[in-house]
């Protein structure tokens, strides 16, 4: 099962990777940009959870995105925490990929079937929740 999930992941990511390569982003960088574009500034912990990235990887990604001018730190009410937000350049980069991303998703869903896609997503959520429960019991 894990190999089948990895193969499905790689296959479904392929068209995204091609477009992300074209605009100079990694899949992981895109996940961070997309998460920030969909809401308010986030802490590293929030981004790690939302983007399913390990903290050391997220630190490197945030450093690279900051250096490229796509994200910037924002002060938080709690001086111990810092949040990041998209900059104007980050919003432009998001806009560059967002429409194409939606087209890729729509094409995949149309070919696979909307009902089947919804069922698959529901089943994957149930599988993750079941696995989390089992792992918590160990």
Image (spheres, grey):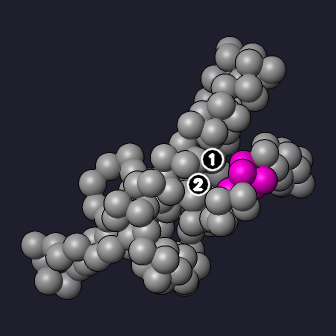
Residue on which the image places disc 2: 132
Percent of width and height locating residue 57: 58, 79
On the picture, is 129 further left or further right than 4? left
> Is residue 17 visible in this depiction of the protein?
yes
> Is residue 46 visible in this depiction of the protein?
no
Residue on which the image places disc 1: 128
Residue drawn 74% across the image and 18% down it: 110
Q: Which residues are magenta?
A: 16-20
On the picture, is 14 further left or further right than 132? right
Residue 116: image quadrant is top right
Residue 120: image quadrant is top right
Percent of width and height locating residue 53: 56, 68
Percent of width and height locating residue 19: 72, 51
Residue 99: image quadrant is top right
**SS class of the residue under badge 2?**
helix
- Report the front residue among 112 and 25: 25
- Report the front residue among 23 and 9: 23
Name the main secondary structure of what is drawn in magenta: helix
On screen, residue 45 above or below 137 = below
- Report the front residue among 2 and 15: 15
C-alpha gap between disc 1 and disc 2: 6 Å
Residue drawn 67% across the image and 26% down it: 106
Quadrant where the C terminus is found in the figure? bottom right
**SS class of the residue under badge 1?**
helix
Percent of width and height locating residue 111: 80, 20
On screen, residue 109 above or below 71 = above
Task: Confirm or deny contact between disc 1 and disc 2 (CB under 8 A).
Answer: yes
């Amino acid at each position: 099962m894990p190999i089948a999930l990895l193969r499905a992941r790689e296959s479904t990511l392929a068209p995204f990777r091609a477009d992300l390569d074209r605009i100079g982003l990694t899949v992981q960088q895109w996940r961070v940009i997309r998460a920030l574009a969909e809401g308010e500034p986030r802490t590293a912990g929030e981004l790690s959870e939302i983007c399913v990235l390990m903290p050391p990887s997220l630190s490197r990604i945030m450093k690279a995105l900051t250096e490229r001018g796509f994200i910037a730190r924002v002060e938080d009410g709690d001086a111990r925490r810092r949040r990041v937000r998209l900059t104007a350049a980050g919003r432009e980069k998001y806009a560059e990929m967002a429409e194409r991303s939606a087209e890729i998703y729509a094409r995949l869903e149309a070919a696979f079937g909307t009902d089947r896609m919804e069922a698959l997503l529901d089943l994957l959520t149930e599988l993750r929740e079941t696995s989390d429960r089992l792992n918590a019991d160990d």
